[in-house]
Image (tube, grey):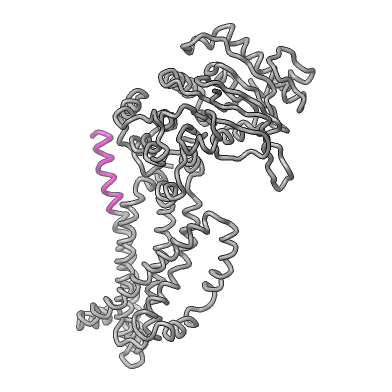
Amino acid sequence: MSTTAVGAKVLPARRAVALGAPVVGVVVFFALWEGLVRLLDVKPFVMPAPSRVVRTLANSPGFYWREGRVTGGEAVTGLLVALVLALLLAIPMARSRLFERAVQPVTTLVQVVPLVCYAPAFVIWFKPGSKPIVAVTALISFIPLLYNLVAGLRASDRDARDVLRSVGASRGEILRTIEIPSALPHLFAGLRTAVGLSLIGAVLGEWFALRSHGIGLEIQKGAVVGAPRVWAAAFTLGAMGAVALGVISMLERLLVGQRAATSERA
Amino acid sequence: MAAVELTDAGKRYNGRAGVVDALGQVSLSIAEGEFVSLLGSSGCGKSTLLRVAAGLLPLDRGTARVLGRSPDQARQAKQVAFVPQTPALLPWRTVRANARLLTRVNRRGEAARSLPDDEIDALLAEVGLADVADAHPHELSGGMQQRVALVRAFALGAPLVLMDEPFAALDEILRVEMRYLLLRLWEEHRSTVVFVTHSIGEAVALSDRVAVMAARPGRIAGVETITLPRPRTPDDEDTDAFTDHVRRLRHLLANGNANGPSGATSTSTSTSRSAPRRLERYR
């Protein structure tokens, strides 16, 4: 058998192992959870077994789909608002250390003050409804996007920028041609962090915004609806986060694929 | 009209270690169509001088003129092509798209001689990159990437090409190959080339004149006119004339560094007492 033929068989095998490993990890995790709950006879109101949570989900899939869509919409809208704001602020910050120094204390304050402190204020400013939820979501997603974008814009090749400057390219042309494409890997790293945070923001926002829909309300009503429904809501949020991360990974492979190949070779 | 005219040019950097005179009072005139190398050790102001001519750095003292205009005006008018030490290719663009890059920006200042796309493709073919025109930079070797950078510069059709140690990262065999490729492109396009290098042999093989620079403050320690006939071939590097130029440049480098700011400003064959030890650095 030729070396190529051996290589061709080995590669799909490695790929299958690489793809199978996370599935095995998830299955083992839930099997352990299920086993421990049954073995220790843990009551469902303390900690339901995964099979019980799945049964709860299966009993009313329409409900979790509807409520999940509300929360997901708020999270995505907040994430997009944060992305636009982060891009607008990151460009001058990346270009001017002085501006960055001026902005940094404010962004640090925003970052360190617990989000629950802003939420009531946002409800007062934007009135109850989806707006304060989007504002909370945008705020919590903003910081990781901002700092990853600043780092990404600064990571662009200085020689390449000089080549463009030497032919009189405008700042806008340099931004479009070099800086933004260079910042994409950093942007996707920021997005992966921000996705989880945006779901936290949306859930937290729903607790304060006097809404009648949203997966966050199901969690808030935990004592009333029971642990299985709270965990079913948590599973819904987990699934939403996993789908969002999958979409981000797909976009990243599409837009940054060539550079990923470069780093793999290096 | 000179392609580059520097008169008493001075540039000073304020760093943590204090003030550094990157350029003292440098005066240098480079004629249109000439190939001039700037030769010297690290920190002698070669790259600073090149970046001043490219309009990327302003002078603190003196004047700089590029093709009869200020360097910044020449830059805005796309009269200058700059080739940095790294190929500086954009990894998300194909070889072809990288080669066309400079013709796609600042269209207001489009150089009159900028090559159309089909001629850029022909230039890629001429340097042996036709088969990889649709590949991405990470699929190319270092030498191939540098060839793309050369095509990108010559595709602009700018009358002045400024090159900052473009072959420094390549191995010696590839460097020799690249220098004759560069000469071929230059002889076809007849731009003025200012070429920064650490390599004496490279400077002699390529240039009409070699300006030797010395440090603290950065200055021209001497200028050697290269009398080798053109077109040049790798065989020229085995001639006595080539060896003579190399020897004189080594002495100029040693004298320039040994003598300090009052060092020689013309071609010289003499060496100072400390020269033999210092010469080792430039072999």
Residue B225 percent location from the top left of the image:
60, 14
Task: Note whether residue A121 is visible.
Answer: yes
What's the residue at 63%, 10% (across, down)? B244
The reply, left or right, for residue B116 in relation to residue A175 is left
The quadrant of the picture occupied by the N terminus of chain B is top right
Q: Where is B233 relative to A29, above or below?
A: above
Magenta stretch encompasses residue A6: yes
The reply, left or right, for residue B67 in relation to residue A265 is right
What's the residue at 50%, 37% (across, down)? B75
The quadrant of the picture occupied by the C terminus of chain B is top right
Q: Where is A44 relative to A87, above or below?
A: below
Looking at this view, is B59 or A216 the one in front? B59
The reply, left or right, for residue A60 in relation to residue A224 is left
Q: How many marks?
A: 0
Task: Note whether residue A41 is visible.
Answer: no
Looking at this view, is B260 or A39 the one in front? B260
Magenta stretch encompasses residue B229: no
Residue A259 percent location from the top left of the image:
39, 46
Q: Dominant secondary structure of the magenta stretch?
A: helix
Residue A75 sits in quarter: bottom left
The reply, left or right, for residue B251 in relation to residue A77 is right
Residue A224 sits in quarter: bottom left
Furthest-bottom residue in this view: A224
Looking at this view, is B59 or B275 the one in front? B59
Residue B140 percent location from the top left of the image:
38, 34
Looking at this view, is B155 or A74 the one in front? B155
Q: Where is A83 relative to B167, above or below?
A: below
Report the span colored magenta: A1-16
Residue B192 percent location from the top left of the image:
50, 23
Furthest-right residue in this view: B273
